[in-house]
Image (cartoon, helix red, strand yellow):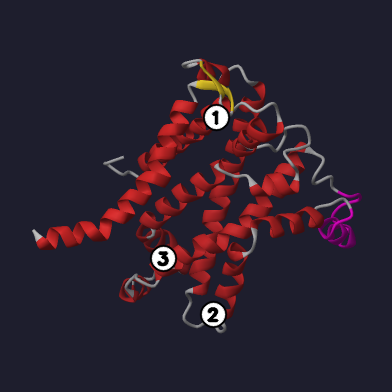
Amino acid sequence: MKSTLIGWSFIGIAAIMIGLFYFYPMIKALLLSLQTGTGTNLSFVGLANYGRLFKDPVFIETVKNTVIYLIVQVPVMIVLAMVISVLLNNKKLKLKGLFRTAIFLPCVTSLVAYSVIFKYLFADDGMINLLLLKVHLISGPIPWLTDPFWAKMAIIAAITWRWTGYNMIFFLSALQNIDESIYEAARMDGASAIQQFWKITVPLLKPIILFTTITSTIGTLQLFDEVMNITKGGPGNATMTISQYIYNISFKYTPDFGYAATVSYAIVILIVFFSIIQFRAAGEKNA
């Protein structure tokens, strides 16, 4: 009995804090999504807000934008992180610590600071255009921040730069736990480096690939800082994400906290949907 009480004393405070700061706000947000208005001036509308989602052209466009970021950026970032981790796991490579630190460093930088830097880099007279003009790859400045397509590419480049190193750490730690004798046996059987990568490394990294893909998907569906600071959702609404739309509904447009809560639950539904797809694709039986 005494040991049970001691155990509960350790987890009790944490359980209370989780309930207070996680589950209580989730329940309140769900109840709020059934209302409309702001502050104390709220009125119950039931499921009307959820029906409004399908008729809201701005919401539909933000979903399209967010999904484009997801299906383009996440695979590129995961592949880059995996390839870089394999290269940096090479025992013959010198200055490995320096390279690992350099690649990981972007993910500890300030979101706002690096977003502002990327905004200047991709400006019409920014360093990216100047470099491309210098090497004669383009004949005129690319409208990175004013063209819908190029603006999306600038956002994708920014978040790939920041988060690739973060995912690299997970792959690197997993690679260091793979028994070297497996690779030695493969080399004795005549397997090339590419064959070893596809036949040994990738299958053994499957749990980490699934984990990083899901966490990256969640992060991309919640994307806000980069878009807000680089393009402000423009041109028009061409780069606006769901999270930025929630912010606009709450604080920029005529405030409607009930509808903003409804849009936030749309993110939850999308996260669950894409997570199930990824579990199924990975062959997880319990998904």
Of marks 1 and 2, the one in the foreground: 1
Q: Nearer the viewer, residue 274 or 14?
A: 14
Residue at horizontal 70 percent and vertical 43 percent from the top: 152
Q: Is residue 19 left or right of residue 139?
A: left
Q: CA distance from mark 1 to mark 3?
A: 45 Å
Q: Is 141 located above or below residue 242 in the figure?
A: below
The region drawn magenta spans: 125-141
* Residue receiving disc 1: 263
Residue at horizontal 40 percent and vertical 57 percent from the top: 208
Q: Secondary structure at mark 1?
A: helix
Assess disc 2: are there few (<14), some (14-19) or many (≥20) residues with their C-alpha within 10 Å of its C-alpha: few
Q: Which of the 4 image quadrants contains residue 250?
A: top right
* Residue receiving disc 3: 196
Looking at the rendered structure, the kind of residue marked 3 is Gln
Q: Which mark is residue 97?
A: 2
Location of the C terminus by quadrant is: top left
Sequence-wise, the earlier of marks 2 and 3 is: 2
Q: CA distance from mark 2 to mark 3?
A: 24 Å
Q: Nearer the viewer, residue 103 or 88?
A: 103
Q: Nearer the viewer, residue 180 or 205?
A: 205
Percent from the top left, x then y, of residue 278? Answer: 41, 42
Q: Is residue 7 left or right of residue 287?
A: left
Residue at horizontal 56 percent and vertical 26 percent from the top: 40
Q: How many marks?
A: 3
Assess disc 3: are there few (<14), some (14-19) or many (≥20) residues with their C-alpha within 10 Å of its C-alpha: some
Looking at the rendered structure, the kind of residue marked 1 is Val
Percent from the top left, x then y, of residue 212? Answer: 45, 54
Sequence-wise, the earlier of marks 1 and 3 is: 3
In magenta segment, residue 236: no
Q: Is 74 located above or below residue 66 in the figure?
A: below
